Image (tube, grey):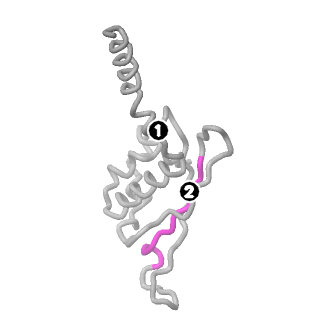
Amino acid sequence: MCRVLIYLMAILAAIGGGGCSLLESRSPEEIIADRAMAQARYLMNADYESAVTYVVPSYQSSARAKFYPAEFVGSATWTDASVVWVKCDEALEPDRCRVRLWVYGGPTVGRASSRGDDIPWTWETVWIKINGEWYQFLG
C-alpha cells in the first residue's frame, strides 16, 4: 500500500511539474492578440521602453532600437485600440502570424463618422515565435 502511495505521489509530482504547460491551452491567436493589445496600451501611454520589449530581440539589441520612440511618436494621441483579427500560418504549431488592429485617434483625431465615433485606422503587423515566445517583427 505504501509503495502505491509513493508511485501515486511521483505521478502527481510529474504532472505538477509540467502543469504550467498543461494549463497553457490558449491558441497562438489568443496569445498574440493579448500581446498586441498590451503593446498598444504601452504605446498609448508613451511607455516606449515597455512597448519595445514586444519587438523581436534582434531589434531590441540593435542600434535602431534607440529610434523606436520616434517611430511611434504619435501613439500618445491614440485613444483606443482593438484586435480585428489574428491570422497564423497554416501549421500544426505556427511560428508566424499577421495581426490587424483598429486604432482610434492619432491621424484621425478630429474626424468622426456619421455616428459621431472616431474612425479607426488599420495597423497590421507580423508576429513571429522565437524560443517559445511571440514577438512583433519590425523589418
- Mark sitting earlier along the chain (1/2): 2
User: What amino acid is at disc 2?
Assistant: Val
Instruction: Tell me what residue is drawn at x 40 percent, y 70 percent.
Output: 80
Q: Position of residue 26 (x, y in %)?
A: 49, 46
User: What amino acid is at disc 1?
Assistant: Glu
Q: In this rendering, would 93 be left or right of 106?
A: right
Query: Mark 1 falls on what kind of element?
Result: strand
Q: Quadrant of residue 81?
A: bottom left
Q: Is residue 37 above or below residue 2?
A: below
Q: In this rendering, would 88 be left or right of 132?
A: right
The reply to whether dot 1 and dot 2 touch (C-beta < 8 Å) is no
Name the outermost residue toward the right: 90
Neighbor class of circle 1 (other Cα within 10 Å; few <14, some 14-19, many 20+) is some
Name the outermost residue toward the top: 3
Instruction: Tell me what residue is drawn at x 45 percent, y 46 percent.
Output: 55
Q: In this rendering, would 86 be left or right of 74?
A: right
Instruction: Tell me what residue is drawn at x 56 percent, y 56 percent.
Output: 99
Q: Position of residue 111 (x, y in %)?
A: 47, 85
Separation of residues labelled 1 and 2 (CA atoms): 16 Å
Instruction: Tell me what residue is drawn at x 33 percent, y 50 percent.
Output: 50
Q: Position of residue 23 (x, y in %)?
A: 42, 38
Disc number at residue 99?
2
> From which residue to which does the magenta span run?
97-108
Q: Is residue 113 above or below residue 13?
A: below
Q: Is residue 5 above or below residue 136?
A: above
**Residue identified by numbered label 1:** 133
Q: Is residue 34 above or below residue 135?
A: below
